[in-house]
Image: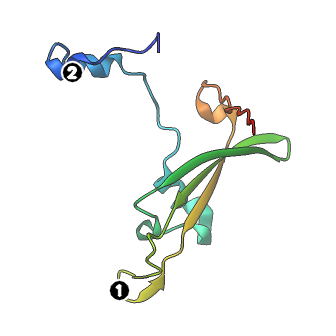
Amino acid sequence: MSDATDISGLDNGSLTIAEAISAAVPKTLFLDIVKSLSAASLGANAFALDEIPSKIEGVAFDSDVQQGNTTLHTLWIAADNDFVQIVNDVNGNPILNPNQFFVFGFTDSDLNGSVFVPQKFNFRW
């Protein structure tokens, strides 16, 4: 917390929104889920835009995997069906509404100079 920026002045008006934004940590887009799932390069596996879940509910990193000589970090994205098993498509036809899980692989070079450091957990029972 010692390196955190104090933005409590937003509450009392002593700090403007512009000042708070300029103190924010810079960020860049890491993954465009819609663009990735609807990419033409996926061919028949590409999702139509209306098939991509509008509400992503879970994001988690998992174990690294090897693809040839390349190490891929894995990012799991989940969208549940809100207990609605059948929905209507754009034409009004009933279709299944399954829970969906998407797994993306990325390399260190995909991070534009940032470094991926997986969390380490020590469990004690």
Tell me which amino acid carries mark 1. Asn
* Residue nearest the viewer, comparing 69 with 124: 124
In the drawing, does residue 66 fall left or right of residue 25?
right
- Mark 2–mark 1 distance (CA, rounded to whole Å): 48 Å
Position above or below: 83 against 62:
below
| Disc 1: which residue | 91
Q: Amino acid at mark 2?
A: Leu
Q: State the image quarter where residue 90 is shown.
A: bottom left
Q: Residue at x 42, y 22 (%)?
A: 25
Looking at this rendering, what residue extends furthest in the front direction?
A: 125
Q: Position of residue 71 (x, y in %)?
A: 78, 40
Residue 104 image offset from top left, x and y in percent: 63, 51
Residue positioned most to the top:
2
Category of crowding for the residue at label 1, using alpha-carbon neighbours closer than 10 angstroms: few (below 14), some (14–19), many (at least 20) = few
- Quadrant where the image shows the C terminus: top right
Residue at the location (29% across, 18% down)? Answer: 7
Q: Nearer the viewer, mark 2 or mark 1?
A: 2
Compared to residue 59, the image places residue 11 above or below, namely above
Q: Which mark is residue 10?
A: 2
Quarter-of-image position of residue 45: bottom right
What count of labels does the image hold? 2
